[in-house]
Amino acid sequence: MDTDTPTGAGPRAGRREWTGLAVLALPTLVLALDMSVLHLASPQLGADLGPTGSELLWIMDIYGFMIAGFLITMGTLGDRVGRRRLLLIGAFAFGVASLLAAYATDPLTLILGRALLGVAGATLAPSTLSLISNMFKDAGQRAVAISVWISCFMAGMGIGPVVGGVLLEWFWWGSVFLPAVPVMVLLLVVGPKVLPEYRTRDAGRPDLTSAALSLAGILPTVYGLKRAAEDGFGPGPVVAIVAGAVFTVLFVRRQLRLDEPLLDLGLFGDRSFRAALLIILVSTAAGGGLYLFATQYLQLVAALPPLTAGLWLIPTAVASAAGSLVAPSLARRLRPGHVVAGGLAVAVAGYLTMAVAGADSGPVLVATGITLVFFGAGPMTALSTDLVVGSVPPRRAGSAASMSETATELGISLGVAVLGSLGTAVYRGRIEGSLPENVPADAMRDTEDTLAGATAAARDLPGVVGDRLLESGREAFTAGMNIAALVGAALVAALAVLSARALGHVRPTGAAPPGTKPSGEHPRTPQAGTPEARIPRA
């Protein structure tokens, strides 16, 4: 049916809506799983396809960048053509792209497959979250449903290495993409039976020019940062970064002129909305970057088999889900800004734990640190997402969902690119001059590129020389991880302060009737999920 539900409280959801939520959890889980499932496969992938360090980073993060680049467009498209229809189209495309990536025979084909997966994923992400907003009209139920949705996303990140480790134990690296295929087939079969269709008749047409400008702003900037980490800030990286900035400015100017913009910049005038998106962006950037370091450390530095490394990360999945699910309950008794700040403080402790890990520490410190990071990020993600999505009427849910998802996906990919490049720069700075003598030129070149290259080169060298080379590589990689973790700790500590200050005025859920004004206080900012919070802003 075509639905454009009026703003305000609605009826409570029943069995069909909760069954639909279970179905929507499937693509959400797969989307997140594909963000991390390839991390443990990178050593095998590197040995098989032989990508350069830059190509390996593109293989890892092009998926997230394409999702982030197309999310706004797909959110608007879903509002127009139907959110369930777009979800099913995306499911089919995601399954096909997974097969292409699984059987790639060279780095370029794999990068292309990952890029197509990102475009398909961009159709799934806003559709799932906006459908939840439409299906659960009661504010309390919607908060719980969004927490479940967030927990599935974060759990998918956590179990990615476990799934990847099991598959890598028995199959080739490309097998990590295949679990998505049966999940998408199941969604195509069951989705039409349990998910209602929603579309908005007056939604604006997707603006392809704005979509192109958003991609042109994101990709050159990240490319420039990667090249700068490899070769320094020469002419090439500087030109790429400047080009990205220019296209970003053009994108913003176009949105300000359009009657139906791809991105409604007016929403950023609200302090809480602005702060919530910034916290999501920076926090997920720090967490996404350090998660890549954690998975590589366990396998390449602690020398664990893929499956064992994945099992060490199971607590990460449990902690991330727990942090997301406990947030709505805490926010009913404490101010959401303080709940978010407390969670981020726990995450800072996790980053500092990873910052003191050494090459000979074993897996305990790193696994504990990344688990604390994910647990602390749970309340931030759940409450900030509810604040963003609950602040608009149902007819604009697709656009709001795409904004929240853009911040999340772009944050993860930026973290992999920026912190990964930082770690690579530290690695190469430390490895120079620390290698043993009489190392062949080709082995030295591979070692100076990545730790995966050092591990492969060490296998072909005599025992003592190979051991010393591998030890130097592991120490250099760990130093890069330590620096990245300190940067992450500083960023997230600043976010905790920002959350307490910028979101501290938001009252606990249900703390006061809507519209009340206690004596001597300024009117409160509408809490996400309350009827007055969903009134469109002028």
Image (cartoon, rainbow, N blue to C red):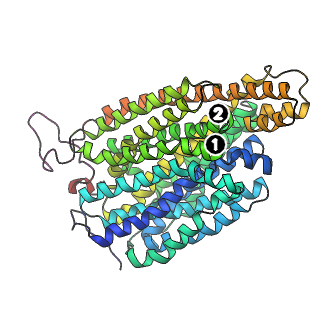
- Counting labels gives 2
The C terminus sits in image quarter: bottom left
Q: Which residues are magenta?
A: 508-528
- Near mark 2 (Cα within 10 A), the count class, few <14, some 14-19 or many ≥20, is some
68 or 439: nearer the eye?
439
Q: Position of residue 278 (x, y in %)?
A: 43, 41
93 or 256: nearer the eye?
93
Q: Position of residue 56 (x, y in %)?
A: 71, 45
Please name which of the two marks, 2 or 1, marks the residue nearer to the observer. Answer: 2
Residue indicated by mark 1: 222
Q: Residue at x 46, y 68 (%)?
A: 78
**Prevalent SS, magenta region:** loop
Q: Is residue 135 above or below residue 105?
A: below
125 or 307: nearer the eye?
307
**Dot 2 amino acid type:** Ala
Q: Is residue 519 magenta?
A: yes
Is label 2 in a helix, a strand or a loop? loop
Is label 1 in a helix, a strand or a loop? helix
Q: Residue at x 79, y 27 (%)?
A: 467
Q: Is residue 428 above or below residue 217?
A: above
Q: Residue at x 64, y 42 (%)?
A: 222
Corner quadrant of residue 496 = top left
What label does residue 302 carry, if any?
2
Q: Is residue 218 magenta?
A: no
Q: Is residue 195 visible?
A: yes
